[in-house]
Amino acid sequence: MRCAPPDNRPTPLEFATCRPFLVREIAALGNLRVVLALGALAWRSALEALEENEVAIPRPRPAFAHGARADLGRVTLFASYHVSRQNTNTGRLTADMFDAVLRRIRREMGEPRTRIS
């Protein structure tokens, strides 16, 4: 989602309204290899949008957890807690935790190690 909804939580209608855009964006990325979902809601939405793009999603669906990785064939889905103020101010998500996920993604993609600032 590319918005900040009221109460910091999109409604089911907002998800349904936005999903076609996400599905089309994924379809347009022909060489897509990695997706990073920021939060459990994004994880679920990414799985649904990838499935609509004919990416095989195992059953039961992979569960969200910070640092989770789901190999979905041609696409690998990674998860992080959302980088919201609520998560960063409370320490639920630290810069080191987020950087660790990004480093793991870079390794997955075979990119050289560089400093994440």
Image: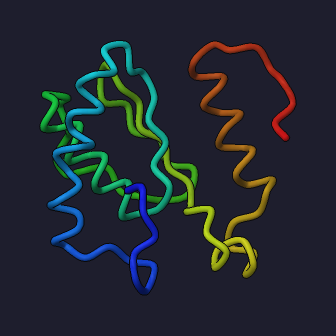
Residue drawn at x 16%, y 30% is: 53
Q: Which residue sits furthest bottom?
A: 7
Q: Position of residue 61 (x, y in %)?
A: 24, 51
Which is more toward the observer, 68 or 109? 109
Identify the colour scheme used.
rainbow
Specify the quadrant that holds the C terminus: top right
Q: Quadrant of residue 25?
A: top left
Which is more toward the observer, 15 or 91? 15
Specify the quadrant that holds the N terminus: bottom left
Q: Position of residue 35 (x, y in %)?
A: 44, 36
The correct choice, above or below, for 101 with respect to 97 in the image is above
Residue drawn at x 79%, y 56% is: 95
Residue drawn at x 36%, y 64% is: 41
74 relative position to 92: left or right = left
Q: Quadrant of residue 74?
A: top left
| Number of numbered discs on residues | 0
85 relative position to 36: left or right = right
The correct choice, above or below, for 21 with respect to 71 in the image is below
The correct choice, above or below, for 97 with respect to 111 in the image is below
Residue drawn at x 42%, y 55% is: 2
Q: Position of residue 47 (x, y in %)?
A: 26, 46
Q: Quadrant of residue 112?
A: top right
Q: Position of residue 67 (x, y in %)?
A: 57, 50
Which is more toward the observer, 37 or 56? 37
